[in-house]
């Protein structure tokens, strides 16, 4: 159980970081309405924050998703997560231009987020097989 929770913890950490980035990215248009000080600060820190989040997401997601895939065998999660990380990198590295950074990052983060959500639920259903004796007992108690 402890090992399973630790693995789920990596997924949750990845989800938390993805959420932070989305809030950060989506706050920018609102900050532009609120005033130049806040929006200036967000624009200045945008790329730094994204490099930081990407550097954090890369090892966490690689570890959590590859471990998950080894358990539940859904390689599509690796492709989705990989695609997300590539898009986040394309955004933060500005190879497609500064303007594309937020759009690419948001799409990439959403892909990564989805991969971790599927990974979490797939790993969870594996560690709680429906015909498991303990679960059957629990189901009986709840019924
Ligand atoms: Zn962001």
Image: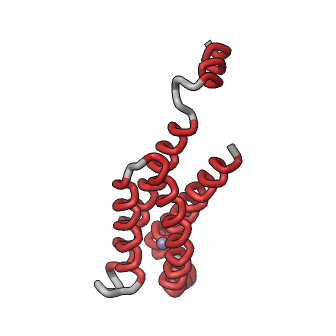
Q: Does residue 36 appear in this view?
A: no
- Where's residue 57, x and y in %? 52, 70
Instruction: Answer with left or right where residue 65 lies relative to residue 102.
Output: right
Task: Decide: is 122 above or below 28.
Answer: above
- Where's residue 63, x and y in %? 53, 64
Colouring scheme applied when the structure was drawn:
secondary structure
Q: Residue at x 52, y 48 (%)?
A: 120
Instruction: Answer with left or right where residue 134 lies relative to residue 29.
Output: right
Q: Does residue 108 appear in this view?
A: yes
Q: In which quarter of the image is the C terminus?
A: top right
Task: Decide: is 1 above or below 43.
Answer: above
Of the pair 83 and 43, the residue shown nearer to us:
83
Task: Decide: is 36 above or below 141.
Answer: below
Q: Which residue is drawn at 42% across and 81% down?
A: 92
- Where's residue 61, x and y in %? 50, 64
Q: In which quarter of the image is the N terminus?
A: top right
Q: In which quarter of the image is residue 133?
A: top right
Q: Quadrant of residue 7?
A: bottom right
Of the pair 28 and 67, the residue shown nearer to us:
67
Q: Which residue lies furthest to the left in this view?
A: 96
Q: Residue at x 36, y 60 (%)?
A: 80
Total numbered labels placed on residues in the image? 0
């Amino acid at each position: 159980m402890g090992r399973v929770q630790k693995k789920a913890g990596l997924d949750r950490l990845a989800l938390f970081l993805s959420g932070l980035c989305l809030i950060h990215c989506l706050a920018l248009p609102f900050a532009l309405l609120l005033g130049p000080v806040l929006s200036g600060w967000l624009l200045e820190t945008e790329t730094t924050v994204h490099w930081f989040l990407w550097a954090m997401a890369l090892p966490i997601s690689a570890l959590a998703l590859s471990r998950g895939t080894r358990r539940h065998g859904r390689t599509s999660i690796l492709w989705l997560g990989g695609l997300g990380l590539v898009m986040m990198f394309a955004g933060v590295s500005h190879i497609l231009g500064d303007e594309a950074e937020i759009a690419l990052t948001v799409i990439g983060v959403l892909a990564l987020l989805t991969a971790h959500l599927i990974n979490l639920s797939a790993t969870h259903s594996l560690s709680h097989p429906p015909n498991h004796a303990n679960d059957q007992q629990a189901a009986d108690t709840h019924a």
